[in-house]
Amino acid sequence: MQGIASYAAFGAGLLTMTGLTVALARWARIGLGWFPLVVVVRAAVQLSIVALLLRGILAVPWTVAAFVVLMLTTASWTSARRIRGLWHGRRIAVAGVLAGAGCALVVIFALRLVDLDVRDLVAVAGIVIGNSMSAATLAGRNFRRTSHARRDEIEGWFSLGATPSQAHEEIGHEAVREALLPTLDQTKSTGLVTLPGAFVGALFGGASPVEAAQFQLVVLAGVAFAMTVTGVVVTRLAGRTPYVVAEVSDA
């Protein structure tokens, strides 16, 4: 009974905090509606399921491959929905997430920066894939928005005989830069402003402060690399066509 009571108190507190978020967003007329509540409830359900899955994955290590594929699929699908307004945006999102996360994970484990075991693979892959998803979404949306704002400039490049890639080159650079800046700023302030989750989690898991710091540094470097690869792939693919907005069939 005591366990049920503690879970109930935790759930009530979580709902209260989320309710405050919804109320503030409504008061400020941000236009989010019930979305904050929906995402928190969805996260709670998903984390509960993942907690049960991880118990089985840790007991049967070979199943980790299927779990990583599930994470990649979900991340690609989520980002694809966000940038489907781009020409072939869904395909671009999938290519960006797979390229960024895949390259980063291969480099991390090839260099033996982290031991190739089930726990470390799941932990690092989850963080890297999640940030690749964010990079694909931010870079794609920034690219589309900036392309619309600078349409006259793009048309000017076309009139001079430039290819779509050349006309969108600077816009792509700007889109990637804007997508990376928040993460790079957070990385720069690590230890002074924030204590990242990987560092704290490693400490709680029994690692020494030095080991926790090493693990966090690997994660930070991997995230920066993954997001850069993802952003470059997304903007380069998006800039290959003069048509920034997707066809109705691709929306």
Image (cartoon, helix red, strand yellow):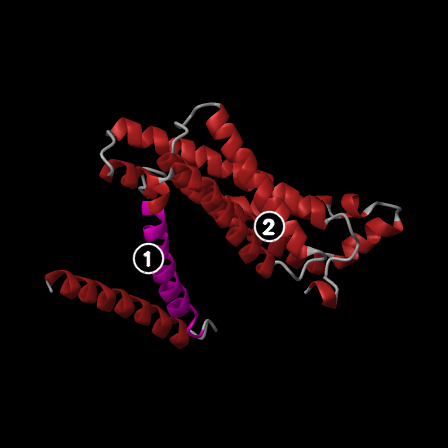
Q: Earlier in the sequence, mark 2 or mark 1?
A: 1
Q: Is residue 2 visible?
A: yes
Q: Nearer the viewer, mark 2 or mark 1?
A: 1
Q: Residue 245 appears at what percent x and percent y?
A: 72, 61
The magenta-colored residue range is: 33-55
Say if residue 182 shows up in the picture: no
SS assignment at label 2: helix
The percent coordinates of residue 150 (x first, y second) are 72, 56
Which residue is more in the foreground, 75 or 154?
Answer: 75
Report which residue position mark 2 lands on: 139
Going by the picture, which residue comes out furthest to the left?
2
**Kind of residue sitting beneath label 2:** Ala
What is the crowding at mark 2: few (fewer than 14 residues within 10 Å), some, or many (at least 20)?
many
* SS state under label 1: helix
The tag on residue 48 is 1
Residue 145 image point, x, y percent: 65, 59
Magenta span includes 100: no
Residue 174 left/right relative to 60 = right
Where residue 37 appears, as percent x and y from the top left, is 37, 69
Q: Is residue 37 magenta?
A: yes
Task: Identify the residue shown where x is 53% and y is 49%.
Answer: 133
Label number found at residue 195: none
**Residue in the image at 46% along x and 71% along y:** 32
Residue type (three-letter) at the residue carrying disc 1: Ser
Mark 1, Cα crowd under 10 Å, few <14 / some 14-19 / many 20+, is: few
Q: Is residue 207 left or right of residue 167?
A: left
